[in-house]
Amino acid sequence: MPDEYENKKNIFLCQKETLNIKCPNNSVIVFDDANFGRGQSDSERCSEWFGIETSQCDNHKQTLKVLNDKCHEQQQCILLVDKVIFGNPCVTITKYLRVIYHCKRKDNYEKWQSKISHIVVDEAHCVVQWGHGFREKFTELVKLRPVFPNASILALTATATTEMQNEIRKQLGMKSALTVQSSMDRPNIKLTLVKRPAGFDELRAYKSSFERTKVYSKLNWCGYGYEEVVRPLTNGDKEDNIEKCVAQFHSPCTSEMKSKVLSDMVSPGSDLKLLFATEAFSMGTDLPNVRRVIHAGVPKTLEIYIQEIGRGGRHGKSSTAILYYNKSNISQAVPGMTDGMRDYCNSKTCRAYLCEHFGCEFSEMNLKHECCDLCEMECTCNQCSETKNEIPSEMEQTHNIIDVSLSAAEIGLKSSILATVIDYFESENECLNMPNAAIYTGLTKELANLISENYQAYLSGTLILEQYRKICPEIAENISIIVQIYCANHFKLIKSELIIIIYNYFFGGPQAVVHVA
C-alpha cells in the first residue's frame, strides 16, 4: 500500500487507477462508489454522521435521487455519468458509472445508532388498525428494532383494549414493556344514543341549546352535508355569511384549508359553528372549546368512537356526545362493523360497557343525568324529579317521534322493494310463455316477500344464488341491483333530511362540530 494511503479510512480512485491492499485476518473490506450510496428515494439526508460537508449537501441529495430512480430494486446497474449531477472528479474521463449496492460501514451505523435513544410511536393503535391493507408502512415500524437495538420504544394511545395492547407490543417488538394506563372514561362527557331521525321535524323537536359541535361522517357525505347546509333552505335565498359558519375537514382538503379550519376552531371569536369531518380530524387535534360531538351514523369500532368523542370536553366543562343510528347501521351485513360497537348501541349501560370493554374501572356519578341518557331516566335528583313531574322531556318526545317515523320509513322501503321485485318476477316469468312459469323459474311472490323483508342481506346476488340454485346469476344480480337502488335512495333521503335538520338544530346556538358515519 502506498504511504499516502497508510492509516486512511477512505480512499478515492479514478478510472484505471490501481491499488494493492493488504489487510490482517478477520478484516472487513468495503468497496463503495464515491459519494454514492443506497437509500430511500424520499428520505435522502445530508449529515455529519456520514462525513458529508454542508457545501456538498444539495449535490449529494440529487445524486442519491438519481441512483434510486435508475437503480431501484437492482443489485447493480450502469449509469451514464452526468457532469452536472454526479460531478466530474476525474476531469479527463467521461464514461459510465457502475453501481453495486452493499451494506454501509459498521462505524457509520454505530455513530447513527448512538444518536437515537428513544423511538416514540404516537397513536399506536393505528399500527394494528391501519397496518393491514390501509397504511401498510405501519407494520414495518418493527424493523426499527434491529436498526436501533439500544433504543427504548414508547407507544402512546388513548384507545386500546387489553387485547390491542398485546397486539401493539407484538407489532412493535416490545418484549418486556411497562404499561402505564389511566381510565379512558371522560366523566364530563354525557353519552347519548338516539335512533336516527327519518325526517326534518324529528330532530327539530329537540331544541336544546349547544356549544360548538362536530359532526363525523364518511368522506362521501362530508361534502354533501356541507352543500346541504350552505344551500338555500327557504325561498331560494342564501343567508348572509352562511359559509363562514360551516366547514369540512377530510383528507382531500388542502393543507391551507385544514390550517384555516383548525385556526377557526381554536379561535373563541370565530364564526365557525358546524364542522363536518371524517376520522382525519380525530387524532392529533386539541381544541379546547368543542362541547358537542355528533355522529350521524356508527363508527366501525369503539376505538374509533372514543377517539372521536374525545375531541369534545377537553376544557373539562360539561359536554355531550350524541350517536344517531338505525338498525341498518349495526346490521351483521355492514362490512367491518365490530361486535363491540354493535353491542354498545344495544347496551343498556353505555358508559359502564365502555369501561368494561377497555378494561378500566367504572365509577358511578353522583348526578346520574350527567352520565348518559340511560342513567338520566333513573336519576332522582331534585332537578330531574321536577322535570319528570311536568311534561315529557324534549329528548323523550324525540325518542317517541323517531321510533314511529323510522318504523314508517322502514315499511315504506320494504313496500317499494316488494312491488318492484314482483313486477320484475312477472316480466321474467312471462318470457317463458307457459302457465305457472314461477314453478320453473322460482320467481314467486313468496321469494319477493322474503327479499323485501330481509333486503339488507340481498344487497349482493351471492346469497340469492346460494339459497336458490334454480335462479340464474343474471337474475340474481338484477334483484340485488333493485335492492341497492331503493336502499341508496332511501338512505340518501334520510341523510339529506338529517343534514337540513342538523343545520336548524345547530344554528339556534353557539358553535359546533359533527361526525357523520
Image (cartoon, grey):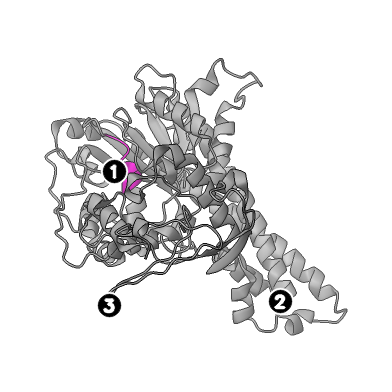
Q: Earlier in the sequence, mark 1 or mark 3?
A: 3
Dot 3 alpha-carbon crowd within 10 angstroms: few under 14, some 14 to 19, many 20 or more: few
Q: Earlier in the sequence, mark 2 or mark 3?
A: 3
Quadrant for the N terminus, please.
Answer: bottom left
Give the Cα distance between marks 1 and 3: 72 Å
Dot 1 alpha-carbon crowd within 10 angstroms: few under 14, some 14 to 19, many 20 or more: many
Instruction: Give the quarter of the image for residue 187.
Output: top left
- Contact, mark 2 vs mark 1 (Cβ under 8 Å): no
Q: Which residue is mark 2?
A: 473
**Whole-percent x, y for residue 451 in the image:** 61, 68
- Secondary structure state at the residue bearing disc 3: loop
Q: Which residue is mark 1?
A: 191
Q: Which residue is mark 3?
A: 25
Q: Amino acid at mark 1?
A: Leu
The residue lying at 29 percent from left, 43 percent from top is 191
Is residue 511 visible from the viewing direction of this image? yes
Asked whether 499 falls inside the magenta stretch, the response is no
Q: Which span is picked out in magenta?
A: 306-313
- Secondary structure state at the residue bearing disc 2: helix
Q: Given the current orientation, which residue lies at the most extreme front position?
A: 3
Q: Is residue 290 left or right of residue 114?
A: right
**Against 331, is 489 above or below?**
above
The residue lying at 20 percent from left, 68 percent from top is 175
**Whole-percent x, y for residue 164 in the image:** 28, 62
Choose between 36 and 398: the one closer to the eye.
36
**Whole-percent x, y for residue 208 in the image:** 35, 28
Q: Amino acid at mark 2?
A: Pro
- Secondary structure state at the residue bearing disc 1: strand
